[in-house]
Image: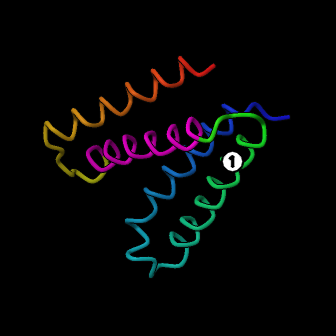
Amino acid sequence: MINPYLLIFVGALSNLIAVYLMKPSQGMSRPWPAFGVVVSSLLTQWCISQSLQNGVKVALSVTAVVVTVMAGSALMGHLLFSERLAALQWCGLTMAIVGVTIATLTNG
């Protein structure tokens, strides 16, 4: 049995890869990056489903992946594609990360 929290991590990472590949896929018109988006998205869904089967609560699993991808894609856009983030966006990302951390620590 694979550790369900490792599955959540791999799911979030594969979703970040899908988000990254969306830009080079140019609207899903370039075959290889588009293929990478589809495969990465499918891997994300598989990892989430496996973590749920192994006892992780739905809210924790989905929220952790969504917030990781939200924060990761914002940082990726900022660092790799020179997209600027407003102070309020940074504040929202920080609040989301803190919220997921608290929810994870209090998960009984």
Q: Residue at x 35, y 34 (%)?
A: 96
Task: Determine whether 21 is above or below 15 in the image.
Answer: below
Query: Which residue position holds label 1?
Result: 47
- Prevalent SS, magenta region: helix
Task: Please tell me whether residue 90 is drawn above or below residue 50 in the rendered image.
Answer: above
| Quadrant location, the N terminus | top right
Q: Residues within 10 Å of mark 1 (few under 14, many from 20)?
A: many
Q: Is residue 68 magenta?
A: yes
Q: Is residue 93 above or below residue 30?
A: above
Where on the picture, by quarter, is residue 57? top right
- Placement of the C terminus among the 4 image quadrants: top right
Q: Please provide percent x and percent y for residue 25.
A: 43, 72
Q: Nearer the viewer, residue 40 or 52?
A: 52
Judging from the image, what secondary structure is the residue with disc 1 in?
A: helix
Magenta region? 59-79
Residue placed farthest to the bottom in the image?
29
Q: Residue at x 40, y 67 (%)?
A: 24
